[in-house]
Image: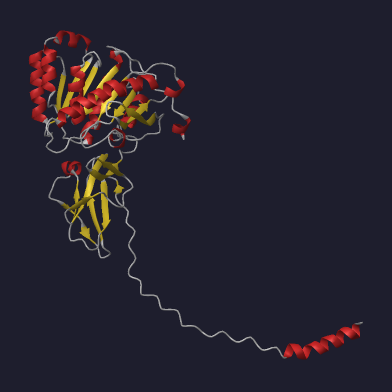
Amino acid sequence: MSRLIAVLLLAATPALAQQPATPAPTPGPAPAARPPQGPQRPQVQSPVVDGDKATFAIYAPKAADVKLSSGEIDRLVPGPNKAFTKGENGVWTLTVAPLLPGIYEYAIVVDDVSMADPSSPNVVGNVRGARGTVEVPGPAGKPRHDEWRPIAHGTLTQHWYDSKVTQTRRRLHVYTPAGYGTSTKKYPVLYLLHGAGDNDAHWSQLGRANVIADNLLAEGKIVPMLIVMTDGHPYRPQQGEQGGREKALKMFEDDLLLEVQPLVEKTYRVDTTRARRALAGVSMGGAQPLNVGVGHPDRYAYLGAFSAATGGADVHVQALARNAAAFNKGSRLFWIRIGKDDFLLQQNRTLVESLKKAGIEHVYEETDGAHMWGFWRQALADFLPKLFKPAGAAPATAPPPSAQAQR
């Protein structure tokens, strides 16, 4: 058998040797050379905070002029327009100092076009566009009143609802304090309103209302409460629309009283008595306590108006003057504050004179500051401890820190 296999193999060998060889592949055209690459776009980080210094940067190689725009920073670091310096890599930079601990809004103006910082992760939009924010922390061991701390924190809920008043879907934000989820008691509630350029998200994004409340509660300075932040734009009048502002004010009033307040009292555990309700706001939202609050004295025991746009409030003041004694008896606090550099200062002074003539008890304060979120955050921090405490009451008891806060 082995001899047979050997013979067969020998017989097959010539046949295999006669098979044509596989032709070599024809070489194709050489790959095209890659075009030369230009310089890579540099990595930009902005803003960078170092102590009391903030450095802003933007990549704009074709720009002729770059400036920083920030009313809040200009108040602290006065001087001419804050111009950036252009580097050879096309990155413009600017360092501003000294900045006090705080939160500052800003925009970057490139060849007269204002924009949010394209490299910043902290950008806030509103009805007029977007801008960046830069935060300078407080010194070690001395955090700001609006600075996040390792303490027990409440919950911020975004709540949508269908409004029969506006025939639209609308939104509000609700802050519930630490301990709300495990408690069975009913809480007092503050309805907190924003200005014309913002919406219901800005009292938490820029106003830090939830953070301020957390910090004050942890310090035992306030009573645990809900804070309801509503959208103040139920209707947007067209430019030059006759009666548009009045329509918007009335629609907001109806939405607050007929939609928002019933929704909150049905959904959340809140005390529904007048003595446990407060209404406050800033700018446009500062006018609402003067209109809705003064116009409905049976609704809210506490009113706060910060930098208020007071137009239209005098009508309610005059109506209330006929029964000022009853209002004063039921009012726990009617507090008005405005900055000495605010463009609405004279309006507020005029309103206060009307309140005095009408015999309506109130507290009026003019302090340093302007029409800016830094002023309003401080106003809120000063207002909250005044709410829902009987005269001579001991400070509120701070809740125990959560497990998360202890990490």
Residue 157 at x, y percent in the picture? 38, 31
How many discs appear? 0
Does 173 sit left or right of 322 as displayed?
right
Q: In screen coordinates, is 14 left or right of 330?
A: right
Foreground residue among 277 and 51:
277
Side of 282 where 186 appears, left or right: right
| Occupied quadrant, residue 313 | top left
Query: Taking 73 as reference, is 61 above or below it?
Result: below
Q: Residue 164: x and y, percent?
A: 30, 26
Q: Position of residue 323 (x, y in %)?
A: 14, 9
- What is the image's colouring? secondary structure
Is residue 296 or residue 218 the one in the foreground? 296
Residue 332, quarter of the rendered image: top left
Residue 107, image x, y percentages:
22, 48
Residue 397 seen in this snapshot: no
Please give the name of the residue rendered at 22% of the width and 42% of the height, measured from the top-left corner: 128
Measured along the vertical axis of the image, is residue 376 above or below residue 20? above
Say above or below: 178 vs 66.
above
- The relative height of residue 106 versus residue 262 in the rendered view (above or below) is below
Instruction: Pick whichever, 188 or 385, lies toward us.
Output: 188
The residue sitting at 21% across, 14% down in the picture is: 297
Query: The N terminus lies in which quarter of the figure?
Result: bottom right
* Residue 401 seen: yes
In this rendering, position of residue 391 left or right of residue 112: right
